[in-house]
Amino acid sequence: MPESNSTLDIRLRIEKAITELVNLNHIVVAGQVEPQILADFRDTLNRARNTTWAAQQYMARKENQQDVSDMRSFLAGERIRAAYNLCCLIKDDLEKNEVDLQAGTLIQLHEATKGLAQQLEGRINRLR
């Protein structure tokens, strides 16, 4: 059965990403990366690794007609963990005067976090 265009596109993108990661590995090993950038990169790779593992588990369970609700919970937990880490990094960025941030994106983030905070409060109250 021939691959669809979207499957082929995904395969090519993944192969390109693998090549880029190998090239980045050479730069990292040579010590040409600032520690904070390296930590951010490592966190991003960990999120990608965990998410792809969960997606693989989800597809396997769905294919075998097994319950996938725990995988959805795992993915939601991964997003929460990633959001927490990003919030900490954004807080640090906001404290630095030398970081220029766009008003529009800050307003969008503020609006999104207000809505999220309300939903979080409701969920936390139901858990207590």
Image (tube, grey):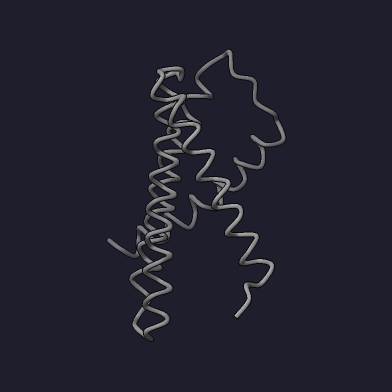
In the displayed structure, 84 sits above or below 122; it is above
Residue 18, image x and y in percent? 50, 45
Q: Quadrant of the N terminus?
A: bottom right
Name which residue lies at 43% across and 65% down.
55
Between 89 and 53, which is closer to the camera in this rendering?
53
Residue lying farthest right?
104
User: In this orientation, which residue lies closer to the viewer: 23 or 114?
Assistant: 23
Q: Nearer the viewer, residue 52 or 109?
A: 52
Measured as percent of width and height from the top left, residue 28 is found at: 42, 25
Give coordinates of residue 100: x percent, y percent.
Answer: 64, 20
State the residue lying farthest toward the top: 98
Using the rendered view, name the quadrant where residue 83 is placed.
top left
The residue depicted at 66 percent of the width and 72 percent of the height is 4
From the viewer's perspective, tell me whether residue 92 is left or right of residue 6. left
Pick out the residue farthest to the bottom: 65
For this orientation, the residue located farthest to the left is 128
Q: Is residue 79 left or right of residue 104?
A: left
Q: Is residue 3 left or right of residue 52?
A: right
Residue at the image point whose x is 40% and y is 71% from the top: 58
Q: Quadrant of the C terminus?
A: bottom left
Residue occupying image coordinates x 62% and y 72%: 3
Image position, residue 30 (x, y; %): 41, 19
Whether residue 70 is situated above or below residue 54 in the rendered picture: below
Is residue 109 shown left or right of residue 119?
right
Give the number of marks. 0
